[in-house]
Amino acid sequence: MTKIDDSKLRMLGKVRRIVTHGGLPHTDDIMACAIAYALGVPHDATIERRNPAPDELDSLAVLVLDVGGVHDPARLDFDHHQRPRSAEPKCAFKLLSEWLGVDAEFTRLFPWYATWNLLDVAGPFAAAAAMGTTWDKLEGLVANPLSDFVIRRFADDPGFRHKVVLTLANAVSLTRRLWASLCEKACPVTICGLPAVDFTACATEEISRCSDTWIRLNRPACLISKDSRGEGLTILRCNDDPRLDFTRCAGKPYAAFCHPGGFLVKTMKRTDDPEVVVRDALTGEGNG
């Protein structure tokens, strides 16, 4: 977990008010507020949706996000709309994260971080093109009833606004802590010639929140963890690796459950040997 400069934390700790734009909210202003809460702004600092007054742009008690036409971290002003179109896309939450030194960490840890930045600054069609697809294929994932509900309640309900930002802030903070802990406990291994990771020393919440990031960054063929519902192990195929099909383990003495999709097997006991399980699951595809 990236250590943030103490002087910047002290600055954020003195903020009494966050000012962001009115009108229809976007993921940028919502997540900028959440990141501010997560990284040092007191949780009782109010969030006001309007244009900042000139004196607020100079006040270190006011954090200005995604509005104001100024990017000046020394005065806690983080807008991007005045930046030229030719500049590297940087939305308000990215400008804030860069100043705090967590941009690289957030890019690795949160899959939404880079995508939402590009979507906010470059727009949906450019963002889709950059991801090798078209907006009509992505629109249903981005524009959906759940996100529309959150955005409109954020705009109209100050109580809900504070609750949703605090919820997102706590999720960011918790995921950072759990990721650091998981990285200390995870044990990369090789099983039957395949890259794997042993998560048996990790807590269930560490795995549930952070295993997807480990898989994305390290690309193991499978991961091994304690079964959260039983007395054995859970062995999970990663990235739909064609070399493993855990339905092949059905009927084996160690097998408590094999998912019909072939991506998961649960064993009877913690002492069951993962190498035996993986060997039985090998399909012969892609193994050279």
Image (cartoon, rainbow, N blue to C red):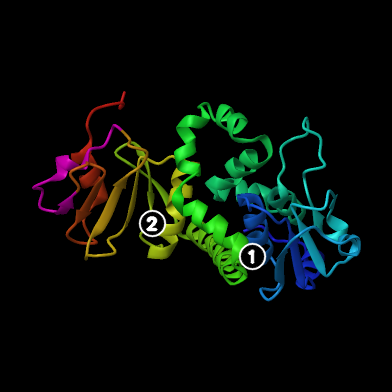
Question: Where residue 231 sits: x, y (%)?
Answer: 22, 65
Residue lying farthest to the top in this orientation: 288
Q: Do tag 2 and tag 1 residues touch (Cβ < 8 Å)?
A: no
Q: Residue at x 83, y 55 (%)?
A: 73
Identify the secondary structure beneath mark 2. Answer: loop
Is residue 53 rendered to the left or right of residue 216?
right
Front residue (pair 121, 261): 121
- Which picture quadrant has residue 204? bottom left
Q: Which kind of residue does numbered mark 2 sit on?
A: Phe
36 vs 110, left or right, is right
In the rendered structure, find residue 38 and report the number of the disc placed on it: 1
The residue tagged 2 is 199
Is-magenta flag for residue 197?
no
Kind of residue indicated by mark 1: Ala
Task: Give the magenta-colored segment's residue range.
Answer: 242-258
Cα–Cα gap, marks 2 and 1:
27 Å
Q: Is residue 165 above or below residue 244?
A: below
Nearer-N-terminus badge (2/1): 1
Q: Position of residue 207 (x, y in %)?
A: 41, 58
Could you tell me residue 237's position as x and y percent? Answer: 31, 43
**Location of residue 43 (image quadrant):** bottom right
Is residue 59 in view?
yes
Q: Whole-percent x and y of residue 141?
A: 46, 42
Q: Is residue 243 magenta?
A: yes
* Residue 41 visible in the picture: no
| Quadrant for the C terminus in the image | top left
Residue 120 vertical position relative to residue 162 in the rendered view, above or below:
above
Q: Residues within 10 Å of mark 1 (few under 14, many from 20)?
A: many
Q: Residue at x 45, y 31 (%)?
A: 137
Q: Secondary structure at mark 1?
A: helix
